[in-house]
Amino acid sequence: MARPLFQALPGTRDLLSPDTDRMRALVEVFADEAENAGFGQIVPPMFEDLGVFTRIGESTDIVTKELYDFEDNGGRRIALRPEFTASVCRAYVQNRPLPPWKAWYAGPAFRQERAQKGRYRQFDQVGAEVIGSHDPDLDTELIALAARFYTRIGLTDVTLLINTLGDAAERPGYLEALKSYFAEHRSELSEQSRATLEINPLRVLDSKRPEDATLIAGAPMLIDHVSNDAGASYRRVLDGLRDLDIAFTEAPRLVRGLDYYTRTTFEFASNALDAAQNAVGGGGRYDGLVADLGGPDDPGVGFSLGVDRTLLACDAEGVFPAAPSTADVFVVVTTTGTEALVLASDLRREGWRVERAYDGRSMKAQMKAANKSGAPVAVIVGEDEAAADTVTVRPMDGDGDQVTIPRNELTKQLKDLLS
Ligand code: HAM
């Protein structure tokens, strides 16, 4: 077959049914869990003033390399959202909901990444944020929300990695320690990490290059540099997780790819996926972001889960299968009138899922289509039935005989057969 004139761009995909049914089902489970925990939905715009996203961090790839930004007709600098957290904070500053404000979301995000399996340029996230409270119980509750979501969709092989990044005031001291450690071992670092060291020493810890691994494993740890207050808050989160029986692994050098994090930071890694793309979600506190966006000095905490990767993890674990929705009834009509149109429409109005054949196909072809559709019942109208205002009902599973009944008894008959 000739190549189509247009194809979806690299890093983007068409999702078709039943994959779309599965994705919607996943979002519904997330929405249900989030709303049980007191979160209301936010639908922020997919694009914002570029400045909203540059606040995520001037030294993160997400901002420097991966933003889709452009100038609109009014000369504004605009960017497609690479994530939701900055938009949620902007919305908090603009709409001033009462703190603590608990919001959940679902939708696409856009990053110009090198496209590969599990790494897309348009991908979907679900997530939850709480703005306006320092209470570390919220950090625990958010992690518990994600954990309940994973449990409900059936994922079991997910590891929770957790760390604290302390507060902004403690950061310079830690960065100094990190800088002098890496400077001492500069020649052993990968070329990329040597460049990163100049811009943001913290991000060197995020390097996934094998040649950096040993050095990173020996680097100074943040936990040794955080204040008593941040340390106590971190211990409270870990105690909470233990009390909720949520397993975790402390990862003292986990920094994650965004600059706004303070205090608790965490990541969910699927052990069923390749190591390079095994992060199915992540989050943490961002106590300075609202103020950076021109708002009050209100703290925030949240997480986002990658929907596409979570579904890949479900595939790898063989859970949360796509359940194609089959029709209840297949309408087979061999008259030349509008009987199929009217019958299908009447039944759909009653709430039945109805499929039918088109293009005036033969009885045999329609029965074949009915069989293929998986619908448990066929309702047949030929010239005789049309004249007598009857329908023939045929169970498709071979159990039970077909019967011809008055049209006005069809609903009862379907209820008997299908409930
Ligand atoms: P993130 O770690 O950048 O955090 O993204 C969260 C999740 O989105 C990742 O763990 C991954 O599953 C998925 N993801 C990210 N990039 C891609 C991609 N190119 N293709 C497929 N999936 C991807 C955030 O976005 C933060 N906003 C999380 C957060 C919320 N922190 C506090 N509140």
Image (spheres, grey):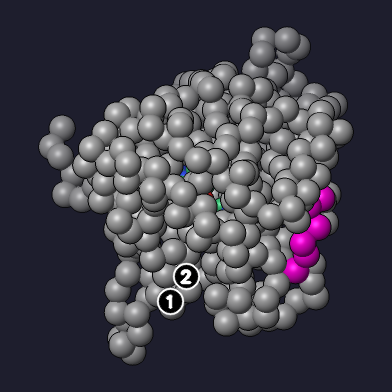
Instruction: Say whether mark 1 is within 8 Å of ligand 1.
Output: no
Q: What residue type is disc 2 on? A: Arg
Please tell me whether mark 1 or mark 2 is closer to you in this view: 2
* Residue that badge 1 annotates: 51
State the image quarter where residue 247 is shown: top right
Please indicate, yes or no, whether residue 370 appears anywhere in the rendered image: no
**Quadrant position of the C terminus in the picture:** top right
Q: Which mark is residue 55?
A: 2
Residue at 58% x, 34% y: name it: 251
Q: Tally the marks.
A: 2
Q: What residue type is disc 1 on? A: Gly
State the image quarter where residue 208 is shown: top left
Please indicate, yes or no, whether residue 50 appears anywhere in the rendered image: yes
**Mark 2 element type:** loop
Mark 1 to mark 2 CA distance (whole Å): 6 Å
Residue at 38% x, 66% y: name it: 58
Residue 317 picture location, percent across and down = 57, 19
Magenta region: which residues? Answer: 132-138
Residue farthest to the top, as pictured: 399
153 vs 372, nearest the viewer: 153
Quick check: 56 above or below 174? below
297 vs 202, nearest the viewer: 202
228 vs 128, nearest the viewer: 228
Q: Are marks 1 and 2 in contact (CB under 8 Å)?
A: yes
**Mark 1 element type:** helix
**Residue 188 falls left or right of residue 289:** left
Residue at 54% x, 66% y: name it: 86
